[in-house]
Amino acid sequence: MPNTQRVEESNNVIKYYDCHCHVDLLKESVLQECRSLYINIVAVSTDIKSYNRISELRAEGLVLAQQFLGYHPDSITPDNLPYVKRVLDLVNENKVEGLGEIGLDLSLDFSQYKDLQEKIFSQFLEIAETKNLPVNIHSRKAQPHVLEILKNYRINPFLHWFCGSKKQLQEAIDLGCYIGFTPACLKSNRYDKLIKITPLEFILTESDAPVYGMSPKDMPMLIERIASLKGIPPREVADTVKTSYLKWIGEI
Ligand SMILES: [Zn+2]
C-alpha cells in the first residue's frame, strides 16, 4: 500500500512556522525550498510597495501561510504621512489577513518621531481590534511604551524579535503577547535565559529574513535550539508553535 504509506509519512513530518519574514527581499529559490522543507511563512510588509510585491509573488504561485500589511515605524516621518494614510485606508477598506510590520522604534535614529509613531501605532491597533486581526509588532528599544499602548486594546499581539528584560517579558506574557525568537539565538547566548523562562505556548519562531543574513530555512535549527534549551523534543516545540500560530491568527 505505497500510497497510504506516503500519506502517513507526510503527515508525520514536522511543520515549521516563520512568523515574521520579509519575503519580498528574498530569492525566490529560497522560498521554493521552504515549501519542500514544510516551512510555512508569514510575510510581513513595511509599506504598500512591499505588500504589492508580495501579492505579485503570491499570484505567481508563492505559497504563504499569511500576508500582513503594515507600515514600518522606522519610516514614519511627517513627510511620509500620506503613505501611512494610504496603508491605513487600504487596511480599513479591504480584507487583509493581519497587520504588520507595525510598532514603535525608539532607537536613537528614529526616536525623534516618537509621538507620531505612537499615534499611528494606536490607529493600527484600533483597526486590529475592530476587525479582529492579528498584529506583528516591532518594538526596538520601546518595550515599555509598546506594552503600555497594548493595554488599551483587546487584540492578538505578537512581539517580533523580543529583546526586552525578564520583567518586560513577564508583562508581555501577562498581556497575552506571543514572543518571537529568531535564529540570532543560534549565534549568541544572550537569548538563552529569555527562551528558558518563556512558557512554550507563548513562543513563536521567526526569521526576520533577510536581516543579519537570517533565513526562513533556519527554522528547523531554531526549533532544535529552543528544544535543547528547554530540554524537550524538537517535535514538541514545533507542534506547540503550530498551535500558538493558529491561535494567534484566530484559527483556533
Ligand atoms: Zn521585520
Image (cartoon, rainbow, N blue to C red):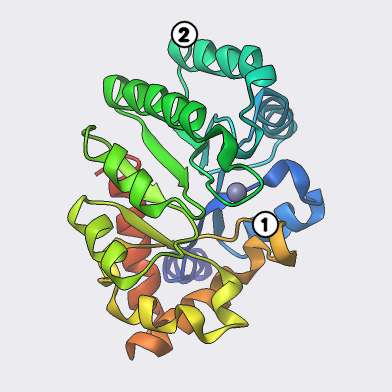
| Disc 1 secondary structure class | loop
User: Compared to 227, does 210 lie above or below?
Assistant: above
Label 1 crowd (10 A; few <14 / some 14-19 / many >=20): many
User: Compared to 159, does 1 lie above or below?
Assistant: below
In this image, 84 relative to 131: left or right? right
Q: Residue at the location (56% across, 13% down)?
A: 85
Whether residue 204 is visible, yes or no, is yes
Q: Any atom of ligand 1 within 8 Å of the CB at mark 1?
A: no
Label 2 crowd (10 A; few <14 / some 14-19 / many >=20): few
| Disc 2 secondary structure class | helix
What is the spatial separation of the Cα atoms under label 1 and label 2, in whole angstroms? Answer: 29 Å
In this image, 17 relative to 129: left or right? right
**Image coordinates for residue 122, horizontal then vertical, percent:** 37, 27
Disc tally is 2
The residue lying toward the viewer, choosing from 18 and 154, is 154
**Image coordinates for residue 44, horizontal then vertical, percent:** 58, 40
User: Compared to 1, does 250 lie above or below?
Assistant: above
The amino acid beneath tag 1 is: Ala
Could you say which quadrant of the image residue 131 lies in?
top left
**Image coordinates for residue 159, horizontal then vertical, percent:** 41, 52
Identify the disc placed on residue 150: none
The residue lying toward the viewer, choosing from 168 and 88, is 168
Q: Any atom of ligand 1 within 8 Å of the CB at mark 2?
A: no
Sequence order check: which comes first, mark 1 or mark 2? 2
The amino acid beneath tag 2 is: Glu
Question: Which residue in the protein does label 1 denote?
Answer: 209
In this image, 45 relative to 53: left or right? left
Quadrant for the C terminus in the image: top left
Identify the disc placed on residue 93: 2
Could you say which quadrant of the image residue 12 lies in?
bottom left
The residue lying toward the viewer, choosing from 16 and 196, is 196
